[in-house]
Image: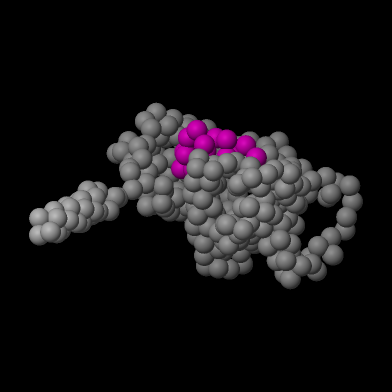
């Protein structure tokens, strides 16, 4: 939680301050007056998603986290269907299935290499992953809507504001003893800062990619992140190399390219079933009756 708190603080110092100096409808005060409660819910979803996924590693195995984290992709597609009116073709579902097959290959390689630990409470850890992945999906759908309909600065600025507040409160209530027990030195501080900077860059550049693609395609691409961590682990931690890792990377990339090869379409929101000319017809009928009454009155006189 502490490293996430640093990331939200960086977002606050950069993007929230940027909003504070803007004027008009894009200013910080104007946004807070109109949509403060919506961004509180968004900040809560994002903070808890980060917290639950990281917390899950304490209880369950690496294999379970890798597998169950993919649950966020179908949730994301379902939310995009109903909220963003995204409409998928058969090729998109096939591409997602191929990507998930690649993840399964990667997990199989982990099992063969025996890189997963046993976990202290697998059920609780698995529940954390499922809930965290669902919250990530909610956050990503909101992010896609905001960056495409509003602005990237508004999303990051408001997330930085409420993410800092929510994660700061949660940090004080739940992890202040753990933070106090850390034996700080320059190496530990450097690791925290490096992680926070990486997260800051991810949060800063991810909206740019989502704006030109979609949250689903970005999450499919992120599936390869475990493989990149593995490649670093080969040199840093002496992980056992397996050809299945290369195979899984290739399968995920094939699915990702296949998904991006065909754009999704956006359905228009359902219009009202009342014919658009109904109100005009009533008005015209009223005018006609009024004219008729006037003519009758004139003839009578």
Residue 55 magenta-highlighted = no
Q: Which residues are magenta?
A: 204-221
For this rendering, which residue is in front, 256 or 62? 256
Residue 219 magenta-highlighted = yes
- Give the residue displayed 80% in from the left and 69% down from the top: 177
Colouring style = one colour
- Give the residue displayed 51% in from the left and 50% down from the top: 142
User: What is the chief secondary structure element of the magenta stretch?
Assistant: helix
User: How many marks can you see?
Assistant: 0
For this rendering, which residue is in front, 189 or 262? 262
For this rendering, which residue is in front, 31 or 284? 284
Counting from the top left corner in percent of width and height, residue 172 is at: 76, 67
Q: Is residue 70 visible?
A: no
- Give the residue displayed 64% in from the left and 45% down from the top: 24
Residue 89 quadrant: top left
Quarter of the picture holding the N terminus: bottom right
Counting from the top left corner in percent of width and height, residue 58 is at: 64, 62
Counting from the top left corner in percent of width and height, residue 11 is at: 71, 47
Q: Is residue 17 left or right of residue 269?
A: right
Which residue in the rendered view is the most extreme toward the front?
A: 301
Q: Is residue 300 above or below residue 20?
A: below
Q: Is residue 201 visible?
A: yes
Counting from the top left corner in percent of width and height, residue 81 is at: 37, 49
């Amino acid at each position: 939680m502490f490293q996430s708190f640093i990331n939200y603080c960086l977002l606050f110092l950069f993007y929230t301050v940027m909003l504070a100096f803007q004027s008009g409808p894009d200013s910080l005060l104007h946004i807070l007056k109109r949509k403060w409660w919506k961004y509180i819910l968004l900040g809560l979803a994002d903070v808890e998603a980060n917290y639950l996924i990281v917390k899950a590693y304490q209880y369950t195995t690496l294999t379970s986290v890798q597998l169950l984290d993919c649950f966020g992709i179908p949730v994301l597609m379902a939310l995009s269907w109903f909220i963003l009116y995204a409409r998928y073709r058969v090729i998109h579902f096939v591409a997602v299935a191929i990507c998930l097959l690649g993840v399964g290959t990667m997990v199989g390689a982990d099992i063969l290499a025996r890189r997963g630990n046993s976990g202290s409470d697998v059920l609780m850890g698995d529940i954390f992953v499922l809930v965290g992945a669902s919250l990530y999906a909610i956050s990503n759908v909101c992010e896609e809507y905001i960056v495409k309909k509003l602005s990237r600065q508004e999303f990051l600025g408001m997330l930085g504001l409420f993410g800092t507040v929510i994660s700061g409160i949660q940090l004080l209530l739940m992890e202040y003893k753990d933070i106090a027990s850390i034996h700080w030195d320059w190496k530990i501080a450097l690791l925290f800062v490096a992680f926070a900077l990486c997260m800051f860059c991810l949060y800063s550049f991810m909206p740019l990619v989502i704006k030109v693609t979609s949250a689903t395609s970005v999450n499919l691409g992120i599936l390869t992140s475990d493989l990149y961590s593995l490649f670093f682990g080969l040199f840093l931690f002496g992980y056992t190399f397996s050809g299945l890792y290369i195979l899984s990377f290739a399968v995920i990339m094939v699915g990702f390219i296949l998904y991006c090869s065909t754009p999704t379409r956006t359905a228009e929101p359902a219009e009202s079933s009342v014919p658009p000319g109904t109100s005009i017809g009533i008005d015209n009928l009223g005018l006609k009756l009024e004219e008729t009454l006037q003519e009758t009155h004139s003839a009578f006189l």
